[in-house]
Image (cartoon, rainbow, N blue to C red):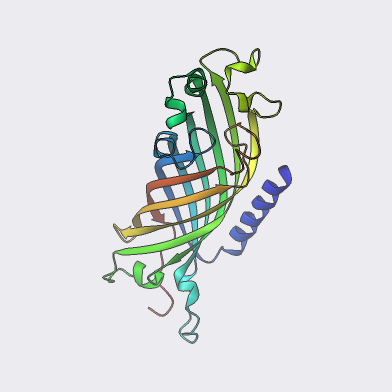
Amino acid sequence: MKKPSTILFVIVFFLEIKAQHYTHDIGGFVGSTSLQTDYGERNDFGSELKNQGISFSVAHYLSFYNRTLRWDPNNVLHNYLMVKTSLQYLTKTKMKHHGIYASKQSYAGEQLRSMKGTVRMINLGVHLEYFLHSLEEFVYPYSDISFNPYFTFGFEYSFFNNTVTSDLGDWQNDITVFPEKYQKKGHIEVGANESFVFSIGFGTRYKLTKNIDLATQINYQYFFSDKVDGLQAAVFENKNNEWALNIQVGLIYHLNFSLPLFY
């Protein structure tokens, strides 16, 4: 699994080398990440809302608006695009079972309620952002455009580490403390692992000063893995990969602010 992460690093490095004469931004974000895993009922509001942790992100943005040439007025698509490379850290997220099955006053319900897990995660990603307003107009000091919404998509590589415990006892000595569907060999896989991630979302920038933007973003992450939480139930019961919803707010600073060439 080391080869994909190496390839991603090479792509990012190549982009940085090729981008030495373009406009660069850096940003920092903080927010909440809700994990939808095999803990709790799928599509249960409690599972989606309560199984969450705090996430921190740093990002580098590469934009092309200041390369616009007055003798090339038709080449405008790049005025709406940014390439973003990011590093996201998800703090230790505690997970529990929620829903009607975990609420039942039975031994099976108690097994579910007693089952708990944690996940820590680092994601490295490359994204493309498309803005609704031209970036050259948004950054211009005398522009009346304060908000600039955008759509984003990209790919990430995730490094995660998970644990699973039970209040009923040490499952490694007595697997029967877990619900029956998790008692079979190979249905609990804890420790460090890796996965590709597809990310899509939207956000907006608000111009605070000439060099600083306030940004909010919401993005959906789909993991190409069902091992993020460490649970591997029967194939017919557990055929969905994990996903996450991130809501973050942050500040973005323009490192080498410059106006487009035709201003």
Most distant residue in the bottom direction:
71
Q: On screen, 256 above or below 246?
A: below
- Which residue is at a point 59% across and 13% down the rendered structure image? 170
Residue 186: give x, y in percent of width and height.
Answer: 70, 29
Say which of 31 and 138 sits in front.
31
Residue 96: give x, y in percent of width and height.
Answer: 47, 28
Residue 122 visible somewhere in the drawing: yes
Q: On screen, 128 above or below 185?
A: below
Say which of 135 and 155 sits in front.
155
- Which residue is at a point 40% across and 35% down the rendered structure image? 46
Residue 66 visible somewhere in the drawing: no
In the rendered image, the quadrant that contains the N terminus is top right
Say which of 259 and 74 sits in front.
74
Residue 215: give x, y in percent of width and height.
Answer: 36, 54
Q: Quadrant of residue 20?
A: bottom right
- Which residue is at a point 43% across and 50% down the rendered structure image? 27
In the rendered image, the quadrant that contains the C terminus is bottom left
**How many numbered discs sit on the rendered protein?**
0
Residue 147: give x, y in percent of width and height.
Answer: 31, 63
